[in-house]
Image (cartoon, helix red, strand yellow):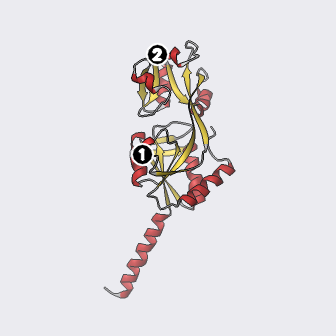
Amino acid sequence: MKLGVILSVVLFSCCVFAKEKQVLRYGVNSNYAMPLLGVTRLPQGQVLQEGVLKDLGEALAKELKREPQFILLPKIRVAENLKQGSIDVLCHLNEVWQPAIKDDVYWSDDLYESRNLIVHIDSKPIKSISDLYGARVGTVLNFIYQNLDPYFAKKQILREDAPTNESNIQKILKGRIDYLVMSNLEFDFYKRIYPTLDAVDLSMDSVQTKCALSKKSSISPESFEKAIQTIQRNGCCGKS
């Protein structure tokens, strides 16, 4: 092989490699709904169009000087992809929600609070978890509900899984469930669309959400944390 051809191949390979290194593989839990994410369903699959997580991904990519590549994943595949390095970063996360990989990723500083509310429509007033005994409560498939899971396990409260809380809203509007569990961020968003929704705050599952960086990512923990701190100063994300 001629020297010129060899050099061309080497240069081309280097350029391709450099280009790949400039991509931020940003994972998004597809079981979330607005205001966290809004998707368009196309024949080739779902495409992320809007939401807090898209805004956060774009802000991170900008600070890291990378091109964002949004990768939608069901919650059940989030941990595996982060641990293996198939994605670089995933946000709106906490060690409580992913205990299996808490030591396999770098955790950012706190971003914003997420706490669960009990949402209902003209249902009996709720003052404590025991008021939910025997009720059908809408939840999201594979999600952890730290305060409610013991009651679900004992069948004291009936857990009714759905793909997203958007699906749960349709179920409660049709009378198929009595209540649903939803974060404060989601409720603030959907209350504007469905004014009949009401919520009770029992101080459940309050966590400070974070972003997680895979330890197998080419992004350094230092640049990741610097990007997060800049985003915090600029006030990006976590607002409906």
Q: Does 163 sit left or right of 118 as displayed?
A: left
Q: Secondary structure at mark 2?
A: loop
User: What residue is drawn where x is 43% and y is 77%?
Assistant: 11
- For the C terminus, give its image quadrant: top right
Residue 177 % position (x, y): 46, 19
Whether 113 is drawn above or below 151: the answer is below
- For badge 1, the amino acid type reads Ala
Whether 131 is drawn above or below 203: the answer is above
- Judging depth in this view, the residue of 111 and 17 nearest the camera is 111
Q: Secondary structure at mark 1?
A: helix
- For the N terminus, give its image quadrant: bottom left
- Judging depth in this view, the residue of 118 and 43 nearest the camera is 118
Checking the image for residue 58, the label placed there is none
Quarter where residue 204 is shown: top right
Residue 48 % position (x, y): 49, 45
The residue most toward the front is 103
Mark 1 residue crowding within 10 angstroms, few (<14) / some (14–19) / many (20+): many
Checking the image for residue 79, the label placed there is 1
The residue most toward the left is 1
Residue 212 % position (x, y): 51, 49
Between the residue at mark 2 and the residue at mark 1, the CA separation in whole angstroms equals 31 Å
Residue 118 % position (x, y): 55, 23
- Judging depth in this view, the residue of 81 and 55 nearest the camera is 81
- For badge 2, the amino acid type reads Ala
**How many labels were placed on the picture?**
2
Q: Earlier in the sequence, mark 2 or mark 1?
A: 1
User: What residue is drawn where x is 47% and y is 69%?
Assistant: 18
Residue occupied by mark 2: 135
Mark 2 residue crowding within 10 angstroms, few (<14) / some (14–19) / many (20+): some
Q: Does 230 sit left or right of 93 as displayed?
A: right
Whether 60 is drawn above or below 3: the answer is above
Whether 163 is drawn above or below 29: the answer is above
